[in-house]
Image (cartoon, rainbow, N blue to C red):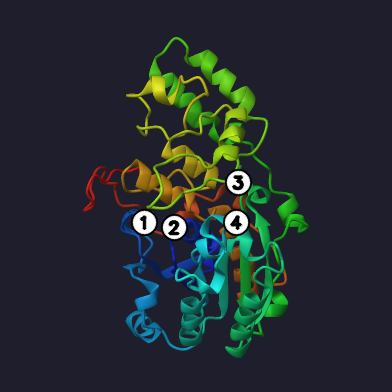
Amino acid sequence: MSNTESHFTSVEICAGAGGQAVGLHAAGFRHRALIEIDEHACATLEHNVKNLAWGACEVMKQDLTQLDPADLKQTLGLEDGQLDLLAGGVPCPPFSAAGKQLGEDDERDLFPAMLGLVDELKPKAVMIENVRGLLSPPDKFRSYRDKIVSRLHEAGYVVCKWDLLEAWHYGVPQLRPRAILVAMQPEFKPYFVWPGPDDEAVKQIPRRTVGEALEKTMRARFEASGDSRADTAFKNWYEKAVTDIAPTLVGGSKKHGGADLGPTRAKKTWEKLGVDGLGVANDPENLTDAERDLFGDRGPKLTVRQAAIIQGFPESWVFIGGKTAAYRQVGNAFPPPVAEAVGNRIAAALRKDPVQTLGDPSGTSEAALSTLPRAPLTHGSSDLESARLW
């Protein structure tokens, strides 16, 4: 049975721009609901769910602290144990250095909301994604992790694994460690195999550099400029970019600044890769601001689309909103290939399948994103002010 034929059901909270949703869909999960509070991210989800024909997938703009799990269960028409997977990337600020690492004392901590949904929906499997700060250093949040594990145990689940996964192991050209928790009902646990770096299937996934990932789109940008410097500038960029993976993309917050590629240390790494990290290109095709966005002293700036490629999104996935809003969605996303790798193993466990494969999470299948013919894209349409498609 192929991944796209599995058709397990899922509900996802804190769905953001859909990174986890894309990966889980490619692993064979069909989303009943994608729940998110940000209006631009919801518009992105709605646009893609419609145009990629994801069927009966409801996008819900919802504050999880105000969501009644029983109401959600009734709205979706779910019976106990009917849902296969409850997934979510709960907010990272409570556990990140940038967020002051207040943990459970941070009002943004949504683990209680997630666990409340587990209690009510009783899915067969649970997948929770967060930043590495939740696990490293190991003693920082140990007591809180123990509380979460105890709550899951009381609800009838066994934690299969709670560990770090590095995005670059799955073909994502970026240094992006994520803390992943997988819990399942006891009958499925013996069939779950963690897709960590020592797994033979993971070892077979090709690693990609920034240059390899962006060669096609960067070449197209330089050629489209029509500038006599384009060929030399492209070659200079590629020689640097093909040497390594990218630092972690940072989406930032609504309170602090516009779109750029991270703190000072990250910007210096980007410069070694031939990329100007001081901003993001103004125009998706980069035709109007070539001096700023292509031919600057530090090299070309990335477009939002290229940042999405660095995150592992397929090129068919569209982001809605102005440049800063679109880039923030990309920078805060969970890389789809990592979600797909974990999702494949969860699906195998739910099938009680002893054969453990990963498909090809190094390049999330475009075909797997759609189960029905695509509706035509309507460029430029959105209810959001100053929205555009990226």
- Find residue 338 and name its label: 4
Mark 2: few/some/many CA within 10 Å (<14, 14-19, 20+): many
The residue at which mark 1 appears reads as 41
For mark 3, give the secondary structure: loop
For mark 2, give the secondary structure: loop
Query: In which quadrant is the C terminus drawn?
Result: top left
Q: Does the CB distance between marks 2 and 4 fall below 8 Å?
A: no
Task: Give the amino acid at mark 4.
Answer: Val
Real-space Cα separation, disc 1 to disc 4, in angstroms = 20 Å
Upstream in sequence: badge 1 or badge 4 = 1
The residue at which mark 2 appears reads as 18
Real-space Cα separation, disc 3 to disc 4, in angstroms = 8 Å
Upstream in sequence: badge 3 or badge 4 = 3
Task: Give the amino acid at mark 3.
Answer: Val
Task: Give the amino acid at mark 1.
Answer: Ala
Query: Where in the figure is residue 55, as x and y percent of width and height?
Result: 36, 65
Q: Does the CB distance between marks 3 and 4 fall below 8 Å?
A: yes
Upstream in sequence: badge 2 or badge 4 = 2
Q: In this view, does 131 lie above or below 155?
A: above
Mark 3: few/some/many CA within 10 Å (<14, 14-19, 20+): many
Query: Where in the figure is residue 332, as x and y percent of width and height?
Result: 48, 53
The residue at which mark 3 appears reads as 172
Q: Does the CB distance between marks 1 and 2 fall below 8 Å?
A: yes
Q: Give the residue furthest to the top.
A: 228
> Who is closer to the viewer here, 27 or 103?
103
